[in-house]
Amino acid sequence: MDVRSLFAAQKYAASLPGMEPAPGTGTAANPAVKATRDFAQTLQEAEDLSGAAMTGDADPHALVQALAQSELAVEAVVAVRNKVVEAYQEILRMPV
């Protein structure tokens, strides 16, 4: 075994703990992560229900409710995205 590759492997193993996220970041405790997971779950439920409705296995009222929830979720995400883009553009307009 080449000594340089051994040192590289040791350096890589030593750097792994430094690359792990700090406790409480990137976990379910983060509101952004929770909101993203809720959004994805809402869309997945609506998609599953609409697929079941195509085969006749879903209640039409549940389908309408799921589609309304997914529409509301998409509108909320678009509003947040618009605010982020607006803030970014405002930062770009700031004089240096």
Image (cartoon, helix red, strand yellow):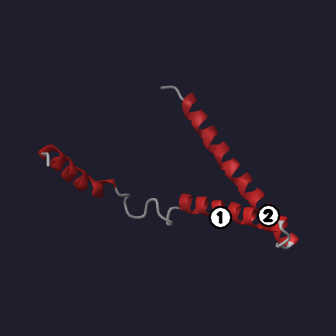
Q: Position of residue 94 (x, y in %)?
A: 54, 29
The amino acid type, in three-letter code, at marker 2 is Ser
Q: Position of residue 90 (x, y in %)?
A: 59, 34
Q: Is residue 34 left or right of residue 66?
A: left
Q: CA distance from mark 1 to mark 2?
A: 14 Å
- Per the image, label 2 sits on a secondary structure element best described as helix
**2 w.r.t. 38: above or below:** above
The amino acid type, in three-letter code, at marker 1 is Gln
Q: Is residue 45 left or right of residue 5?
A: right
Which badge, 1 or 2, is on the more N-terminal residue?
A: 1
Q: Residue furthest left?
A: 3
Task: Say the numbered circle drawn on residue 41.
Answer: 1
Task: Say the numbered circle drawn on residue 59.
Answer: none
- Per the image, the residue denoted by label 2 is 50
Q: Residues within 10 Å of mark 1 (few under 14, many from 20)?
A: few
Query: Residue visible at 15% across and 43% down?
Result: 4
**65 w.r.t. 32: above or below:** below
Query: Residue visible at 12% across and 46% down?
Result: 3
- Per the image, label 1 sits on a secondary structure element best described as helix
Q: Position of residue 78 (x, y in %)?
A: 70, 48
